[in-house]
Image (spheres, helix red, strand yellow):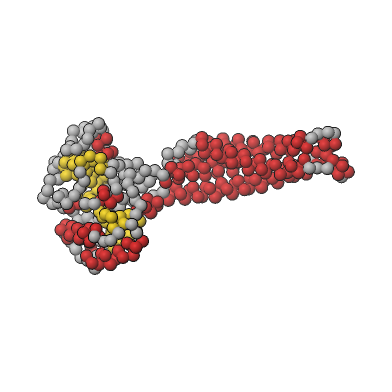
Amino acid sequence: ALAVVVTVGSALMLRSLNELLTVDTGFEPEGVVAFRPNPLGTGRSGVEEYRSLYAALLARLAGEPGVESVGAVQVLTGSGNNWSFPTWPEGYAIPDDGGAPNVNFRAVLPGYFETLKIPLLRGRLIDHRDRDGSEAVAIVNRAFVEEFWPGESGLDRTFRIFSTDADPIRIVGVVGDIRQHGLGREPRPELYVPYMDWDWEMSAWMFVRTNDADAFKAQLRSLVDEVDPSAPISEVEDLEQVFARSAAETRFFTVLLTVFGLLGLALGAIGIYGVTSYSVARRTSEFGVRLALGASRRDVIGAAMRGGAGPVLVGAAAGLATSLVGTRWLRTYLYEVQPTDPLAFAVVVIALGTVAASALAVPAWKAGRVDPVEALASE
Protein backbone atom coordinates (compact mmCIF):
# COMPACT_ATOMS: atom_id res chain seq x y z
CA ALA A 1 0.00 0.00 0.00
CA LEU A 2 2.83 2.42 0.83
CA ALA A 3 4.62 1.50 -2.40
CA VAL A 4 1.49 2.40 -4.36
CA VAL A 5 1.22 5.83 -2.70
CA VAL A 6 4.85 6.77 -3.31
CA THR A 7 4.89 5.38 -6.84
CA VAL A 8 1.75 7.29 -7.78
CA GLY A 9 3.41 10.49 -6.52
CA SER A 10 6.50 9.68 -8.56
CA ALA A 11 4.44 9.06 -11.71
CA LEU A 12 2.60 12.36 -11.28
CA MET A 13 5.84 14.29 -10.85
CA LEU A 14 7.41 12.58 -13.87
CA ARG A 15 4.39 13.54 -15.96
CA SER A 16 4.57 17.09 -14.64
CA LEU A 17 8.31 17.40 -15.30
CA ASN A 18 7.83 16.18 -18.86
CA GLU A 19 5.10 18.77 -19.45
CA LEU A 20 7.28 21.49 -17.93
CA LEU A 21 10.40 20.70 -19.94
CA THR A 22 8.51 20.55 -23.24
CA VAL A 23 6.54 23.78 -22.76
CA ASP A 24 6.89 26.45 -25.43
CA THR A 25 8.93 29.33 -23.97
CA GLY A 26 7.99 31.65 -26.83
CA PHE A 27 11.61 32.19 -27.86
CA GLU A 28 14.81 30.23 -28.46
CA PRO A 29 17.23 30.23 -25.50
CA GLU A 30 19.61 27.70 -27.08
CA GLY A 31 22.93 29.24 -28.03
CA VAL A 32 22.33 32.50 -26.15
CA VAL A 33 24.91 33.73 -23.62
CA ALA A 34 23.76 36.33 -21.10
CA PHE A 35 26.14 38.47 -19.05
CA ARG A 36 25.84 41.62 -16.98
CA PRO A 37 28.54 44.30 -17.18
CA ASN A 38 28.11 46.66 -14.26
CA PRO A 39 28.62 50.36 -15.04
CA LEU A 40 28.91 51.20 -11.32
CA GLY A 41 32.17 49.28 -11.15
CA THR A 42 33.69 51.58 -13.76
CA GLY A 43 32.95 54.70 -11.76
CA ARG A 44 30.39 55.73 -14.35
CA SER A 45 27.42 57.75 -13.22
CA GLY A 46 24.62 59.43 -15.06
CA VAL A 47 22.30 58.14 -17.74
CA GLU A 48 24.57 59.06 -20.64
CA GLU A 49 27.50 57.12 -19.16
CA TYR A 50 25.31 54.02 -18.88
CA ARG A 51 24.02 54.44 -22.41
CA SER A 52 27.49 54.91 -23.89
CA LEU A 53 28.83 51.74 -22.25
CA TYR A 54 26.02 49.53 -23.54
CA ALA A 55 26.01 51.09 -26.98
CA ALA A 56 29.75 50.49 -27.29
CA LEU A 57 29.43 46.90 -26.11
CA LEU A 58 26.64 46.17 -28.56
CA ALA A 59 28.70 47.56 -31.43
CA ARG A 60 31.85 45.63 -30.44
CA LEU A 61 30.14 42.30 -29.85
CA ALA A 62 28.09 42.50 -33.04
CA GLY A 63 31.29 42.50 -35.09
CA GLU A 64 32.80 39.44 -33.43
CA PRO A 65 33.14 36.32 -35.64
CA GLY A 66 30.62 33.64 -34.70
CA VAL A 67 28.18 36.14 -33.17
CA GLU A 68 24.81 36.14 -34.92
CA SER A 69 23.14 38.97 -33.01
CA VAL A 70 23.27 40.93 -29.76
CA GLY A 71 20.74 42.78 -27.60
CA ALA A 72 20.11 43.80 -24.01
CA VAL A 73 17.40 44.19 -21.37
CA GLN A 74 17.44 45.40 -17.78
CA VAL A 75 16.01 42.17 -16.26
CA LEU A 76 17.35 38.68 -16.93
CA THR A 77 14.80 36.82 -19.03
CA GLY A 78 13.68 33.57 -17.40
CA SER A 79 14.65 34.57 -13.86
CA GLY A 80 12.37 35.34 -10.95
CA ASN A 81 13.34 39.02 -11.02
CA ASN A 82 10.75 41.46 -12.24
CA TRP A 83 9.85 45.12 -12.68
CA SER A 84 6.17 46.00 -12.91
CA PHE A 85 4.33 49.30 -12.62
CA PRO A 86 0.73 50.56 -12.52
CA THR A 87 -0.41 51.08 -16.08
CA TRP A 88 -3.43 52.89 -17.56
CA PRO A 89 -4.19 51.55 -21.06
CA GLU A 90 -6.15 53.89 -23.31
CA GLY A 91 -9.90 53.26 -23.09
CA TYR A 92 -9.55 50.51 -20.47
CA ALA A 93 -12.05 50.78 -17.62
CA ILE A 94 -10.30 50.34 -14.28
CA PRO A 95 -12.47 48.15 -11.98
CA ASP A 96 -14.14 50.07 -9.14
CA ASP A 97 -12.88 47.61 -6.56
CA GLY A 98 -9.23 47.72 -7.65
CA GLY A 99 -6.41 49.95 -8.78
CA ALA A 100 -4.64 50.16 -12.10
CA PRO A 101 -3.22 46.84 -13.32
CA ASN A 102 0.48 46.18 -12.77
CA VAL A 103 2.21 45.37 -16.03
CA ASN A 104 5.67 43.88 -16.51
CA PHE A 105 8.16 46.57 -17.55
CA ARG A 106 11.21 45.88 -19.71
CA ALA A 107 13.72 48.42 -21.04
CA VAL A 108 15.42 46.91 -24.10
CA LEU A 109 18.19 47.89 -26.46
CA PRO A 110 18.02 47.23 -30.21
CA GLY A 111 18.57 43.57 -31.09
CA TYR A 112 16.90 42.07 -28.02
CA PHE A 113 13.94 40.54 -29.84
CA GLU A 114 16.05 39.40 -32.78
CA THR A 115 18.62 37.75 -30.50
CA LEU A 116 16.03 35.79 -28.55
CA LYS A 117 14.02 35.18 -31.74
CA ILE A 118 10.83 36.52 -30.20
CA PRO A 119 8.36 36.73 -33.09
CA LEU A 120 7.06 40.12 -34.26
CA LEU A 121 3.32 39.81 -34.77
CA ARG A 122 2.45 43.34 -35.90
CA GLY A 123 4.17 46.68 -36.42
CA ARG A 124 7.89 47.13 -35.87
CA LEU A 125 10.56 46.46 -33.26
CA ILE A 126 12.64 48.91 -31.24
CA ASP A 127 15.59 50.20 -33.24
CA HIS A 128 18.20 52.99 -33.25
CA ARG A 129 15.66 55.70 -34.05
CA ASP A 130 14.12 55.24 -30.58
CA ARG A 131 16.37 57.50 -28.54
CA ASP A 132 16.16 60.30 -26.02
CA GLY A 133 14.12 63.14 -27.49
CA SER A 134 12.21 60.93 -29.93
CA GLU A 135 8.54 60.05 -29.66
CA ALA A 136 7.70 57.91 -26.62
CA VAL A 137 6.92 54.49 -28.06
CA ALA A 138 6.74 50.92 -26.80
CA ILE A 139 6.31 47.32 -27.86
CA VAL A 140 3.75 45.15 -26.05
CA ASN A 141 3.16 41.42 -26.04
CA ARG A 142 0.07 39.58 -27.22
CA ALA A 143 -1.15 39.05 -23.65
CA PHE A 144 -1.18 42.84 -23.13
CA VAL A 145 -3.42 43.39 -26.17
CA GLU A 146 -5.73 40.48 -25.32
CA GLU A 147 -6.07 41.70 -21.73
CA PHE A 148 -6.85 45.35 -22.43
CA TRP A 149 -8.05 45.54 -26.06
CA PRO A 150 -9.38 42.08 -26.99
CA GLY A 151 -10.08 41.68 -30.67
CA GLU A 152 -7.94 44.68 -31.66
CA SER A 153 -4.46 44.93 -33.14
CA GLY A 154 -3.15 47.20 -30.38
CA LEU A 155 -1.10 49.28 -32.83
CA ASP A 156 -1.17 53.05 -32.29
CA ARG A 157 -3.03 52.62 -29.02
CA THR A 158 -1.53 54.46 -26.06
CA PHE A 159 -1.04 53.88 -22.35
CA ARG A 160 0.34 55.72 -19.35
CA ILE A 161 2.67 54.44 -16.62
CA PHE A 162 2.76 55.46 -12.95
CA SER A 163 -0.17 57.90 -13.12
CA THR A 164 -2.93 59.22 -15.33
CA ASP A 165 -1.00 62.48 -15.59
CA ALA A 166 2.03 60.87 -17.25
CA ASP A 167 2.72 61.41 -20.93
CA PRO A 168 1.06 58.83 -23.20
CA ILE A 169 3.22 56.16 -24.84
CA ARG A 170 2.25 54.92 -28.29
CA ILE A 171 2.40 51.25 -29.22
CA VAL A 172 4.32 50.65 -32.44
CA GLY A 173 4.65 46.85 -32.32
CA VAL A 174 3.22 43.65 -30.87
CA VAL A 175 5.39 40.60 -30.16
CA GLY A 176 4.66 37.06 -29.07
CA ASP A 177 4.32 36.03 -25.43
CA ILE A 178 7.36 34.57 -23.67
CA ARG A 179 7.77 32.96 -20.27
CA GLN A 180 9.67 35.76 -18.58
CA HIS A 181 9.48 34.16 -15.13
CA GLY A 182 10.50 30.59 -15.92
CA LEU A 183 8.99 27.47 -17.41
CA GLY A 184 6.18 27.08 -14.89
CA ARG A 185 4.79 30.63 -15.06
CA GLU A 186 2.28 31.64 -17.70
CA PRO A 187 3.05 34.81 -19.74
CA ARG A 188 1.75 38.08 -18.31
CA PRO A 189 0.95 41.38 -20.03
CA GLU A 190 4.26 43.09 -20.74
CA LEU A 191 5.50 46.31 -22.25
CA TYR A 192 8.93 46.95 -23.72
CA VAL A 193 10.30 50.50 -23.89
CA PRO A 194 13.51 51.74 -25.59
CA TYR A 195 16.35 51.75 -23.06
CA MET A 196 17.92 54.74 -24.80
CA ASP A 197 14.77 56.80 -24.37
CA TRP A 198 14.40 56.42 -20.60
CA ASP A 199 16.14 58.78 -18.23
CA TRP A 200 17.02 56.08 -15.69
CA GLU A 201 20.33 54.59 -14.59
CA MET A 202 19.63 50.90 -15.27
CA SER A 203 22.20 48.14 -15.43
CA ALA A 204 21.41 45.77 -18.27
CA TRP A 205 21.89 42.14 -19.22
CA MET A 206 23.61 41.65 -22.56
CA PHE A 207 22.38 38.77 -24.73
CA VAL A 208 24.63 37.28 -27.41
CA ARG A 209 23.52 34.58 -29.83
CA THR A 210 26.59 32.70 -30.97
CA ASN A 211 27.38 29.45 -32.75
CA ASP A 212 29.95 28.51 -30.08
CA ALA A 213 28.89 29.59 -26.59
CA ASP A 214 31.90 28.07 -24.80
CA ALA A 215 34.42 29.79 -27.07
CA PHE A 216 32.61 33.09 -26.70
CA LYS A 217 32.56 32.89 -22.89
CA ALA A 218 36.28 32.10 -22.89
CA GLN A 219 37.08 35.35 -24.67
CA LEU A 220 34.32 37.47 -23.14
CA ARG A 221 36.61 39.24 -20.67
CA SER A 222 39.02 40.32 -23.39
CA LEU A 223 36.17 41.56 -25.58
CA VAL A 224 34.79 43.73 -22.78
CA ASP A 225 38.31 45.00 -22.03
CA GLU A 226 38.49 46.42 -25.54
CA VAL A 227 35.52 48.64 -24.67
CA ASP A 228 36.30 49.37 -21.01
CA PRO A 229 38.91 47.38 -19.01
CA SER A 230 37.41 48.66 -15.76
CA ALA A 231 33.94 47.25 -16.45
CA PRO A 232 33.30 44.27 -14.13
CA ILE A 233 31.22 41.34 -15.37
CA SER A 234 29.10 40.35 -12.41
CA GLU A 235 27.40 37.29 -13.93
CA VAL A 236 27.63 35.06 -17.01
CA GLU A 237 24.81 32.63 -17.85
CA ASP A 238 23.71 30.24 -20.57
CA LEU A 239 20.12 31.30 -21.07
CA GLU A 240 19.08 27.69 -21.54
CA GLN A 241 20.44 26.90 -18.06
CA VAL A 242 18.55 29.83 -16.57
CA PHE A 243 15.30 28.26 -17.69
CA ALA A 244 16.44 24.80 -16.60
CA ARG A 245 16.91 26.15 -13.06
CA SER A 246 13.33 27.40 -13.06
CA ALA A 247 12.27 23.74 -13.09
CA ALA A 248 14.71 22.76 -10.32
CA GLU A 249 12.08 22.38 -7.60
CA THR A 250 9.92 20.12 -9.75
CA ARG A 251 12.99 18.13 -10.78
CA PHE A 252 14.08 17.70 -7.13
CA PHE A 253 10.73 16.36 -5.99
CA THR A 254 10.54 14.12 -9.05
CA VAL A 255 13.93 12.55 -8.34
CA LEU A 256 13.11 12.19 -4.63
CA LEU A 257 9.76 10.50 -5.19
CA THR A 258 11.15 8.32 -7.98
CA VAL A 259 13.92 7.02 -5.71
CA PHE A 260 11.44 6.26 -2.93
CA GLY A 261 9.02 4.78 -5.46
CA LEU A 262 11.64 2.38 -6.80
CA LEU A 263 12.71 1.52 -3.26
CA GLY A 264 9.07 0.87 -2.36
CA LEU A 265 8.64 -1.37 -5.38
CA ALA A 266 11.78 -3.33 -4.49
CA LEU A 267 10.76 -3.79 -0.86
CA GLY A 268 7.24 -4.68 -1.93
CA ALA A 269 8.49 -7.30 -4.36
CA ILE A 270 10.83 -8.80 -1.75
CA GLY A 271 8.03 -8.88 0.81
CA ILE A 272 5.55 -10.49 -1.56
CA TYR A 273 8.10 -13.07 -2.65
CA GLY A 274 9.10 -13.88 0.93
CA VAL A 275 5.56 -14.23 2.26
CA THR A 276 4.42 -16.28 -0.75
CA SER A 277 7.45 -18.58 -0.48
CA TYR A 278 6.74 -19.12 3.21
CA SER A 279 3.09 -19.87 2.47
CA VAL A 280 3.98 -22.34 -0.29
CA ALA A 281 6.50 -24.10 1.97
CA ARG A 282 3.84 -24.55 4.67
CA ARG A 283 1.41 -25.99 2.11
CA THR A 284 3.87 -28.40 0.49
CA SER A 285 2.08 -31.49 1.83
CA GLU A 286 -1.29 -30.07 0.76
CA PHE A 287 -0.03 -29.54 -2.77
CA GLY A 288 1.46 -33.06 -2.75
CA VAL A 289 -1.92 -34.54 -1.81
CA ARG A 290 -3.68 -32.51 -4.51
CA LEU A 291 -1.23 -33.70 -7.13
CA ALA A 292 -1.53 -37.31 -5.91
CA LEU A 293 -5.33 -37.12 -6.19
CA GLY A 294 -5.12 -35.94 -9.79
CA ALA A 295 -4.86 -32.16 -9.68
CA SER A 296 -2.87 -30.69 -12.55
CA ARG A 297 0.26 -28.66 -11.91
CA ARG A 298 -1.56 -25.66 -13.40
CA ASP A 299 -4.26 -25.99 -10.75
CA VAL A 300 -1.64 -26.07 -7.98
CA ILE A 301 0.19 -23.03 -9.40
CA GLY A 302 -3.13 -21.18 -9.63
CA ALA A 303 -3.97 -22.03 -5.99
CA ALA A 304 -0.57 -20.76 -4.83
CA MET A 305 -0.97 -17.54 -6.86
CA ARG A 306 -4.46 -16.91 -5.48
CA GLY A 307 -3.26 -17.39 -1.94
CA GLY A 308 -0.68 -14.67 -2.32
CA ALA A 309 -2.71 -12.37 -4.58
CA GLY A 310 -5.43 -11.68 -2.02
CA PRO A 311 -3.32 -9.57 0.37
CA VAL A 312 -1.57 -7.92 -2.57
CA LEU A 313 -4.88 -6.77 -4.07
CA VAL A 314 -6.08 -5.49 -0.69
CA GLY A 315 -2.86 -3.53 -0.21
CA ALA A 316 -2.97 -2.13 -3.74
CA ALA A 317 -6.59 -1.03 -3.33
CA ALA A 318 -5.77 0.64 -0.02
CA GLY A 319 -2.78 2.36 -1.61
CA LEU A 320 -4.81 3.65 -4.55
CA ALA A 321 -7.54 4.98 -2.25
CA THR A 322 -4.92 6.73 -0.12
CA SER A 323 -3.26 8.14 -3.22
CA LEU A 324 -6.49 9.73 -4.44
CA VAL A 325 -6.50 11.79 -1.25
CA GLY A 326 -2.81 12.05 -0.38
CA THR A 327 -1.48 13.21 -3.75
CA ARG A 328 -3.49 16.44 -3.50
CA TRP A 329 -0.66 17.99 -1.49
CA LEU A 330 1.43 17.74 -4.69
CA ARG A 331 -0.93 20.10 -6.51
CA THR A 332 1.35 23.14 -6.04
CA TYR A 333 4.27 21.23 -7.59
CA LEU A 334 2.38 19.88 -10.59
CA TYR A 335 2.28 21.60 -13.97
CA GLU A 336 -0.56 20.82 -16.40
CA VAL A 337 -1.23 17.56 -14.53
CA GLN A 338 -4.04 16.86 -12.08
CA PRO A 339 -3.41 14.96 -8.81
CA THR A 340 -5.87 12.31 -10.06
CA ASP A 341 -4.31 12.04 -13.52
CA PRO A 342 -5.69 8.75 -14.96
CA LEU A 343 -2.59 8.03 -17.06
CA ALA A 344 -0.29 8.20 -14.02
CA PHE A 345 -2.58 5.92 -12.02
CA ALA A 346 -2.88 3.48 -14.93
CA VAL A 347 0.91 3.28 -15.34
CA VAL A 348 1.35 2.63 -11.61
CA VAL A 349 -1.31 -0.10 -11.59
CA ILE A 350 0.36 -1.84 -14.54
CA ALA A 351 3.84 -1.48 -13.05
CA LEU A 352 2.87 -2.72 -9.60
CA GLY A 353 0.76 -5.49 -11.10
CA THR A 354 3.76 -6.68 -13.11
CA VAL A 355 6.07 -6.56 -10.09
CA ALA A 356 3.56 -8.32 -7.83
CA ALA A 357 2.82 -11.00 -10.43
CA SER A 358 6.54 -11.66 -10.90
CA ALA A 359 7.06 -11.94 -7.13
CA LEU A 360 4.13 -14.37 -6.86
CA ALA A 361 5.03 -16.42 -9.92
CA VAL A 362 8.36 -17.85 -8.71
CA PRO A 363 7.08 -19.45 -5.45
CA ALA A 364 3.89 -20.58 -7.23
CA TRP A 365 5.96 -22.24 -9.96
CA LYS A 366 7.91 -24.07 -7.24
CA ALA A 367 4.61 -25.27 -5.78
CA GLY A 368 3.72 -26.82 -9.13
CA ARG A 369 7.04 -28.69 -9.14
CA VAL A 370 6.36 -30.48 -5.84
CA ASP A 371 6.94 -34.28 -5.97
CA PRO A 372 3.82 -35.94 -4.45
CA VAL A 373 5.77 -38.95 -3.17
CA GLU A 374 8.37 -36.82 -1.37
CA ALA A 375 5.67 -34.47 0.00
CA LEU A 376 3.68 -37.38 1.50
CA ALA A 377 6.78 -39.21 2.73
CA SER A 378 7.85 -36.13 4.68
CA GLU A 379 4.68 -36.42 6.75
Seen from the viewer's position, the closer of residues 33 and 66 is: 66
Taking 238 as reference, is 172 left or right?
Answer: left
Quadrant that contains the C terminus: top right
Which residue is pictured at 80% across the width and 38% down the height?
287
Outermost residue to the left: 133
Residue 330: x %, y % from top left: 47, 42
Residue 368: x %, y % from top left: 77, 40
Quadrant that contains the N terminus: top right
The answer to whether residue 282 of the structure is visible from this angle is no
Residue 179 position (above or below residue 205) = above
Residue 208 position (above or below residue 153) = below
In which quadrant of the rendered view does residue 55 lie? Answer: bottom left
Which residue is pictured at 53% across the width and 36% down the height?
324
The answer to whether residue 328 of the structure is visible from this angle is yes
Seen from the viewer's position, the closer of residues 168 and 194 is: 194
Seen from the viewer's position, the closer of residues 217 and 5 is: 217
In which quadrant of the rendered view does residue 311 lie? Answer: top right
Taking 217 as reference, is 90 left or right?
Answer: left
Residue 19: x %, y % from top left: 43, 42
Residue 308: x %, y % from top left: 70, 39
Which residue is pictured at 35% across the width and 52% down the height?
30
Outermost residue to the right: 377
Seen from the viewer's position, the closer of residues 48 and 327 is: 48
- How many callouts does the rendering have? 0
Which residue is pictured at 20% across the width and 41% down the height?
123
Outermost residue to the front: 65
